Amino acid sequence: MAAAAVTGPDPLRLVVLVSGSGTNLQAVLDAADAPVRVVAVGADRDGTGGLERAAARGLPTFVCRVPDFAVRAAWDEALARLVLDHAPDLVVSAGFMRILGPAVLDAVRVVNTHPALLPSFPGAHAVRDALAHGVRVTGCTCHWVDAGVDTGPIIDQRAVRVEPGDTEDTLHERIKVAEREMLVDVLTALAEDRSWR
Ligand code: GRF
């Protein structure tokens, strides 16, 4: 008698939100062994590298631009509808440079990746701020998203040393190497233990 195939749980369905080049998204797309599946990629602007990476994989994409809405709440509600259309188990904010509102956050759990060791240096200029402060060690954080700016419960962190002569760009590039690895590890762990749902 043939042995029954051993199968795990269904892959975790992810909607990934991006604003930039999308290298974190690419790391998730390339993580063939991770029990996750990117079902759609959304952006808050046209023409981002992240959308191109998604299209190259034949993935559904959507754009939801804040300036296209009269009020912020309408943008939040439109984004929630676009996200929920893909029935995600989890939303990943991977370089998405917008604060999510209650329509999204009350409907689905969201994780964010941030290029600093929170709670130090929240906000949009984390790498610049850490460098300006003169820290010798910085890094990246993956956390649950709540209504605040980079304030939600921390899931994982990786440390990165600041090297003499580092600029914002050189430091950010080294942080992003650690960040991509951390994100894949976190998503794998969340897929394997779904008690957070
Ligand atoms: C990451 O460092 C993310 O934490 C920050 O912007 C960067 C996005 O990089 N908010 P990419 O678009 O994934 O390459």
Image (cartoon, rainbow, N blue to C red):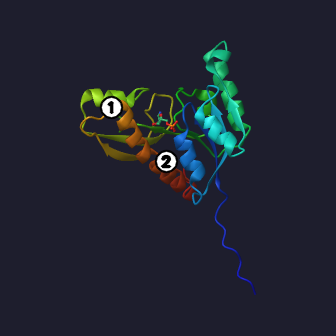
Query: Residue 63: image x %, image y %?
Result: 67, 28
Pick whichever of labels 1 and 2 is earlier in the sequence: 1
52 on left or right of 152 = right
Tag 1–tag 2 contact (CB < 8 Å): no
Q: Which residue is mark 1?
A: 167
Query: Residue 133: image x %, image y %?
Result: 26, 28
Q: Which residue is mark 2?
A: 183
Query: Residue 25: image x %, image y %?
Result: 57, 43
Q: Residues within 10 Å of mark 2 (few under 14, many from 20)?
A: many
Task: Point out the frontmost of discs 1 and 2.
Answer: 1
Q: In the picture, residue 92 is in which quadrant? A: top right
35 on left or right of 122 = right
Q: Nearer the viewer, residue 157 or 19?
A: 19
Considering every residue shown, the one lying at the far front of the view is: 165
Q: In the picture, residue 119 is in which quadrant? A: top left
52 on left or right of 140 = right
Query: Residue 12: image x %, image y %?
Result: 63, 52
Q: Which three-letter amino acid code belongs to the residue tagged 1?
A: Thr
Secondary-structure class at tag 2: helix
Q: Which three-letter amino acid code belongs to the residue tagged 2?
A: Leu
Residue in the image at 44% along x and 26% along y:
124
Residue in the image at 63% along x and 25% along y:
76
- Find the distance from the CA under tag 1 to the CA under tag 2: 24 Å
Q: Is residue 183 above or below residue 152?
A: below
Q: Is residue 68 above or below residue 125?
A: above
